[in-house]
Amino acid sequence: MKLYHAAASPYARKARITLREVEILELVEEIEVAPWTDPEGYRDITPLGKVPALEIDDGPNLFQSVVICEYLASKNSQINLYPIEGGLRWTNLRQVAAADGILDALVGVRVEKLFHESEMQSKKFIQRQELTVEKSLDLLEENALELEVPINAGQIALASSLGYIDFRFSENNWRLNRPSLTNWFETFCQRDSMKNTVPD
């Protein structure tokens, strides 16, 4: 299999962390691409033109991190990143949804600021995305005890999101008044999968 990624992409980082946590590195070749340049042939691998994308030896290519992470996790049944028990399953998937919502909002803000001059930027759009981030982080802080379980997909998604805030939005002091989330993240960052996927 081939996993296409960009080091700075938090979505791709989710997939790369998952790959390491389920211990199947030997099955996957990691290939770095610059998706915004639309490399020749890349749209044949993924019509979205984004990362991550996964080329599978004996099946159709996969795209979107939420799909790729679950597929990679399925390759090692000994490590269960997606609990199937009712309550644990929905808690896990809610964490994934909140973390991905944070990423979607932050990436939207970054694109708005990258591609529009200051006077052309939509302040209402940016404020709405920033509110999404704050409310989602508050929710995760209030329910931080739910993170005190064996590693799962929700934790990986959340760690990728918090890491992206630190990487691209360092002025956002998300740790303020969120001690439980802060402590959890600092501990999670000690995992080899996190250390080995830190963006430059």
Image (tube, helix red, strand yellow):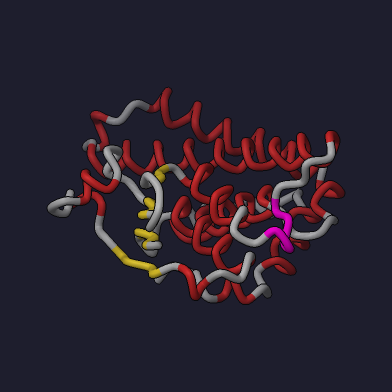
Residue toward you, 140 or 17: 17
Image x and y of residue 4, in percent: 35, 59
Q: Nearer the viewer, residue 39 or 7?
A: 39
- Front residue of 135 and 119: 135
**Residue with the most extreme front position:** 58
Q: In the image, is 36 to the left or to the right of 87?
A: left
Does the magenta-highlighted stretch encompass residue 78? yes
State the residue in front, 11 or 117. 11
Picture residue at 79% right of the left edge, 55% below the top: 179
Quadrant, the C terminus = bottom left
Residue at the extreme top of the image, as rendered? 124
105 is higher (above) or lower (below) than 185: above
The image shows residue 35 at horizontal and vertical percentages of 25, 52
Kindly identify the residue that appears in the image at 75 percent across and 50 percent down: 178
Where residue 173 sits: x, y (%)?
Answer: 60, 53
User: Where is residue 14 drawn, in percent x and y?
Assistant: 53, 55
Left or right? Give the position of 60 relative to 162: left
Residue 182 figure quarter:
bottom right
Q: Dominant secondary structure of the magenta stretch? A: loop
Task: State which region is magenta.
Answer: 77-81
Occupied quadrant, residue 22:
bottom right
Q: Is residue 79 above or below residue 98?
A: below
Residue displayed at 40% across by 38% down? 109
Q: Is residue 195 left or right of residue 141?
A: left
Whether the magenta-drawn stretch holds residue 189 is answered as no
